[in-house]
Amino acid sequence: MRKQKVERKGEKSVRNRTEQIQQRIEQMPESQRKTYLKASQGKGSPRNAIKAFCSECVGYSREEVTLCTDVGCPLYLFRPFKNGSQNQ
C-alpha cells in the first residue's frame, strides 16, 4: 500500500514538471526553445542550463544577459555572452 502511494506521488511530480516546462516553452521565443529543452531534459551541457536560465531571467534578450549587473547571482561569473571586460 505504501509503495503505491510513493509511486503516485512520483508520477504527480513528473506531470507537474512536464506541465511547468510546457508552460515556459509556450511563453518564450522560438529561438530560445531548443537550448531550454536540452537543459530541462538533462541532455545539454551545464553551459546550456546556465544560458537558458540567464536568458529567461532577463526576458530572453542576449544584450541584457551581456549587460547583467546582478553580481550577487551565483551564475554571474558563468553567464554567457559577456565580453572580456566584464569577467570580474
Image (cartoon, grey):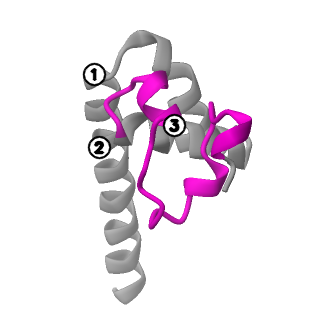
Q: Main secondary structure of the magenta part?
A: loop
Question: In this view, which residue lies farthest toward the bottom?
Answer: 2
Q: Which mark is residue 26?
A: 1
Instruction: Name the amino acid, label 3.
Output: Ala
Q: Eyeballing the image, is 64 above or below 9?
A: above
Secondary element under disc 2, as helix, strand or loop, is helix
Spatial distance from mark 1 to mark 2, Cα to Cα?
Answer: 10 Å
Q: Eyeballing the image, is 84 above or below 7?
A: above
Spatial distance from mark 3 to mark 2, Cα to Cα?
Answer: 15 Å
Answer left or right for 29 relative to 39.
left
Q: Which mark is residue 68?
A: none
The picture places residue 18, in percent across and down from the top left corner, at: 37, 42
The picture places residue 37, in percent across and down from the top left corner, at: 53, 31
Disc 3 designates what residue? 52
Nearer to us of marks 3 and 2 is 3
Q: Residue at x 38, y 78 (%)?
A: 6
Nearer to us of marks 1 and 3 is 3
Secondary element under disc 1, as helix, strand or loop, is helix
Quadrant in which the C terminus appears: bottom right
User: Is 74 covered by the magenta stretch?
Assistant: yes
Q: Residue at x 53, y 43 (%)?
A: 40
User: Is 71 covered by the magenta stretch?
Assistant: yes
Disc 2 designates what residue? 20
Stretch in magenta? 58-86
The picture places residue 4, in percent across and down from the top left corner, at: 37, 76
The picture places residue 64, in percent across and down from the top left corner, at: 41, 30
